[in-house]
Image: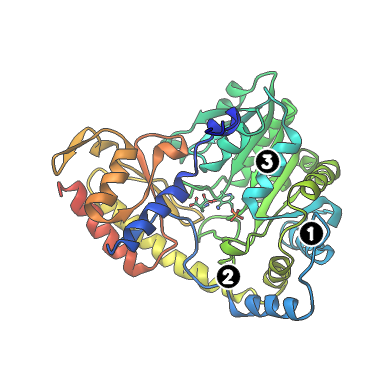
Amino acid sequence: MVPTISRIVQALEPSATMAMAAKARELKAAGRTVYDLSLGEPDFVTPQHICQAAVEAMEAGHTHYTPASGIPELKKAVAEQYRAAHHLEYAPEQVVISNGAKHALHNVFTVLLDPGDEVIIPAPYWVSYAELVKLTGAVPVVVQTRQEDDFKLTPGQLRGAVTERTKILLLCSPSNPTGSMYSPDELGALADVAIEHDLLVVADEIYERLVYEGHRFASFATVRPGLQERTILVNGVSKTYAMTGWRIGWTLSPANVAKAMGSLQSQQTSNPSSIGQYAALAAITGPQACVDVMLAEFARRREFVTRRIAEIPGFSCAEIGGAFYAFINIREHLGRSYNGVQIDGSSQWCLQLLDQQNVATVMGSAFGTEGYARVSFATSMENLEAAFGLIEEFVAGG
Ligand code: PMP
Ligand code: GLU
């Protein structure tokens, strides 16, 4: 017999970012030289002192189950980090350590959403948000933002999307996939609407430390008094410390939400990796110079990518305030034929770019917005230079 997959999982779209990266890897394994701008994963190695802390944790015997919601030292350090950086008071019990921020988001939705509840997600959105919401039986309500607004949700758009069933507003700033950032005032105006309609806000702050000159990050919970009671903050070590493989992320939330997530984890994954947690502890409590070094390199690449996008006819993107992505408007290049292949949508465009020019990007449609392609500049300058040359050639007619 062929086993039947549950309806809820049948409806799940696999992660397009992971799928494009897998395709690029396959082509590389088959011997092609591929310029991979698909995955948002820092190309740097995890800093030495963090790896060393993991070795020391193993040698000290920290190789067993930990409390389900994480080791007390790491929970305390996360709370202290938010206190020092944002003057927010969280008790360690309000922190839950998970297997990456993606798992943390899944936990948040699982403990808060019932079937039929609605979650407002501004598009373009990171590929996993809508799918993780759907897994709970709740409904993602996607609101298209506009490039003219730097892809930021306006209070009017938010108000227009709220219904009796809206439970959560999901925000990501700096944004994956656009790199745009809300100012504290813009967040404040959205917070007013959230308060008016009694919404919870899930603020994905995983790119908080990757912010470029001229931009300022504000944690959502700080932009109006009393917001902590309706806010769930999501963060982690993957992006800031080049630790994607260690799988450690976390939430800061109201105590009852944290308790529910701890119970969920106790049944679901037991605990995040003990060794990973000690490494994350070293990352956030140890020397921070490594973050500045990586940020300086990202800033150099951002400048290059911004310049190249401006140079290529028909291309444009929003100002990249943070993170390591550019969301390129390719609309002018759709509806054309490339080396005899007619290309009408972003998916075909990205697949043909990979097939014809060996450059991997991710289609805007996967982020809920057609007519765009995302490039990640978490890759070497050398790769970026070659890739943009090939992209330019592609749009010029191949
Ligand atoms: N949120 C956003 C916006 C992301 O881009 C990512 C990237 N993977 C995540 C959450 C999840 O990060 P991780 O699971 O590696 O901590
Ligand atoms: N968040 C990164 C990206 O968007 C890593 C892959 C993923 O988890 O989606 O490319």
Q: Residues within 10 Å of mark 3 (few under 14, many from 20)?
A: many
- Whole-number angstrom distance, CA of label 1 to CA of label 2: 24 Å
Q: Position of residue 64 (x, y in %)?
A: 79, 67
Q: Three-letter amino acid code at disc 3?
A: Val
The residue pinned by badge 1 equals 70
- Whole-number angstrom distance, CA of label 3 to CA of label 2: 25 Å
Secondary-structure class at tag 2 = helix
The disc label shown at residue 104, or none: none
Q: Three-letter amino acid code at disc 1?
A: Gly
Q: Position of residue 124 (x, y in %)?
A: 48, 38
Q: Is residue 281 above or below residue 204?
A: below
Q: Is residue 194 left or right of residue 360?
A: right
The residue pinned by badge 3 equals 202
The residue pinned by badge 2 equals 291
Q: Residues within 10 Å of mark 1 (few under 14, many from 20)?
A: many
Q: Is residue 161 visible?
A: yes
Q: Quadrant of residue 230?
A: top right
Taking depth in this image into account, of 261 and 150 the one nearest to the observer is 261
